Image (cartoon, rainbow, N blue to C red):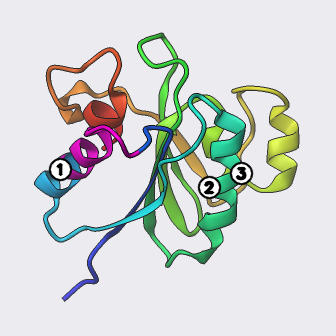
């Protein structure tokens, strides 16, 4: 039997509202065997750099092929892209705002500079825009892509 998939969550949603629970509900609806791990939901609102720092601190300690869902998204509801990133040891999904850069080698992060940018990824890394609406939860909220696109 294959191991149960590990889904690690990092958001700026806080814990006073139902948003983290809604994301977890969507994940478990898609895969009831998933093991959900909370990295943090206490990132300061819209603090992408803090979220990237927390992701960078936690990422190396998870088993290979963990799926990281990171949502600190000041650009929700705008034209910013949703990304899926495969590294040599994990999968990450989140907004194209620099948050997922925590999983990239330092040289690539320096190449990217400030904010999202097109960079050359090293061998073993693949990034794709999440665009196929067939995989979205419908209707897609303009303010809750964590639930409707990333989860």
Of the 4 image quadrants, the one containing the N terminus is: bottom left
Residue 120 lies in the magenta-colored region: no
Q: Nearer the viewer, residue 83 or 33?
A: 33
User: Picture coordinates of residue 91 (x, y %)?
Assistant: 47, 57
Q: What is the residue that sits farthest to the bottom in this orientation?
A: 1
Q: What is the residue that sits farthest to the front in this orientation?
A: 16
User: Picture coordinates of residue 48 (x, y %)?
Assistant: 65, 35
Q: Secondary structure at mark 2?
A: helix
Query: Gap between marks 2 and 1, in whole Å?
Result: 22 Å
Q: Is residue 66 left or right of residue 89?
A: left
Circles 3, 2 touching at the beta carbon (< 8 Å): yes
Query: Gap between marks 3 and 2, in whole Å?
Result: 5 Å
- Which residue corresponds to mark 2? 55
Of the 4 image quadrants, the one containing the C terminus is: top left
Q: Nearer the viewer, residue 74 or 91?
A: 74
Q: Is residue 105 above or below residue 136?
A: below
Q: Secondary structure at mark 3?
A: helix
Query: Badge 2, how many Cα within 10 Å: few under 14, some, many 20+?
Result: many
Q: Which mark is residue 132?
A: none
Q: Which residues are magenta?
A: 15-25
- Which residue corresponds to mark 1? 25
- Which residue corresponds to mark 3? 53
Residue 16 lies in the magenta-colored region: yes
> Residue visible at 25% across and 48% down?
21
């Amino acid at each position: 039997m294959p191991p149960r998939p590990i889904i690690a969550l990092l958001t700026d949603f806080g814990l006073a509202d139902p948003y983290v629970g809604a994301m977890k509900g969507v994940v478990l609806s898609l895969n009831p065997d998933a093991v959900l791990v909370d990295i943090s939901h206490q990132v300061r609102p819209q603090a992408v750099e803090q979220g990237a720092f927390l992701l960078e601190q936690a990422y190396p300690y998870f088993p290979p092929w963990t799926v990281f869902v990171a949502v600190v998204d000041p650009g929700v509801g705008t034209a910013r892209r949703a990304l899926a990133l495969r590294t040599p040891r994990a999968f990450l999904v989140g907004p194209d705002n620099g948050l997922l850069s925590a999983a990239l080698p330092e040289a690539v992060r320096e190449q990217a500079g400030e904010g999202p940018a097109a960079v050359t990824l090293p061998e073993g890394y693949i990034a794709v825009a999440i665009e196929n609406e067939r995989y979205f939860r419908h209707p897609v909220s303009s303010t809750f892509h964590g639930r409707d696109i990333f989860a």
